[in-house]
Image (spheres, rainbow, N blue to C red):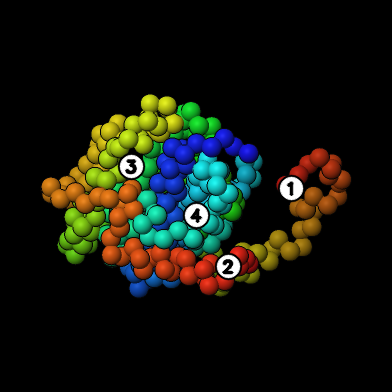
Amino acid sequence: MSTSQPPKTSSGSPLWEVFVRSKRGLSHTHAGSLHAPDAHMALRNARDLFTRRQEGVSIWVVRATDVVASSPDEKDPFFDPAGDKVYRHPTFYDVPDEVQHI
Amino acid sequence: MAVQDLDVAAYCLRLGDDALVLAQRLCEWAARSPQLEEDVALMNLALDLLGQSRSLLTLAGEREGAGRDEDDLAFLRDEPDFVNAQLMELDNGDFGRTMARQLLVSAWSLPLWDALVTSTDPDLAAIAGKAVKEVAYHLDHARSWVVRLGDGTEESHRRMQAGLDEVWPYSFELFESDDLLQRLVERGVAADPAALQPIWLATVSEVVAEATLSLPETDWRPAGGRRGTHTEAFGYLLAELQHLHRSHPGVSW
């Protein structure tokens, strides 16, 4: 994980990741990223960029440098062991029609 | 068909022209903003204002009762027929000046629309109900930038103060009263401009203090926009606004 300064644009603002909750009951989903000088402006920029068409009821912004990501080098030990464990999927019983978002 | 009411028509025309002209000015920032993000933010403000002006000019046309629609009023009037406050038409200048103008306008229009929510004209009240939420965000946006630029670097502070000084004298026109406004305030249609001024000054003073700026001191109070007198910059704005419609009458997408 890098400890360097936040990446900046020519305008000098750090990068922020934006998460939008499209409606109550759903999770926040990554919508994209943007530049802003601070958290206050990042939230407002996110409102203007990602919820212009009523896409959201709630927004989170996170400094891109604060996101800890898995490394491509760790792909095999991280994800491959799940590959042969089909019993972890809810495929062996019927999901009622009324259940959404599963 | 709505009942003719020339006073209400004239009032809606003022507010509609304010919104239309400021929207047109803000649109000049398209593809020129300091940041890509700010480009979208400014266009959102402009679109809100354009929407307000469409509703207001349509209502003005209905109350006038002469068969003019929003397009007739926006595109087929000449400069002396426009009754927007001169503050709206001032050149954008740099981003600081645009934000100074936006702060002064939004700090006025928020209490204005808030008061008009209870206007005795139901159509005007309906427009106010929508506009009040929009301009609350406009004020928040302008406040955020004025504070950051004012309390930012030496250069941003200098330019923010310069922008504020330049647009400040034009704010007094927003609080002028005249016979029309007195009649409409009496009828409960319009907001009393004198009642808006202390609210406006409290908001602006708070933001200016937080931004480490100072309130300009000047006795110069240019005015006349409400009577059709405009600054030199206005003719160019109008030419750009109207030329397409006038060159191709009735053109549509």
Q: Distance between the residues labelled 3 and 2?
A: 35 Å
Circle nearer the viewer, 2 or 1: 2
Task: Assign a secondary structure to mark 3.
Answer: helix
- The answer for which chain carries disc 2 is B
Task: Assign a secondary structure to mark 4.
Answer: helix
Residue B73 is labelled as 4
- Give amino acid for label 4: Leu
- Residue at 39% of width from left, 54% of height from top? B82
Q: How far apart are marks 4 and 3 (CA)?
A: 24 Å
Task: Assign a secondary structure to mark 2.
Answer: loop
Residue highlighted by disc 2: B249
Circle nearer the viewer, 4 or 1: 4
At which x and y percent is residue B213?
Answer: 18, 50
- The answer for which chain carries disc 4 is B
Few, some or many C-alpha atoms within 10 Å of disc 1 (few <14, some 14-19, many ≥20)?
few
Q: Distance between the residues labelled 2 and 4?
A: 13 Å
- Give amino acid for label 1: Ile
At which x and y percent is residue B127?
Answer: 51, 40
Q: Do the residues labelled 2 and 4 touch (CB within 8 Å)?
A: no
Few, some or many C-alpha atoms within 10 Å of disc 2 (few <14, some 14-19, many ≥20)?
few
Q: Earlier in the sequence, mark 4 or mark 3?
A: 4
Residue highlighted by disc 3: B108
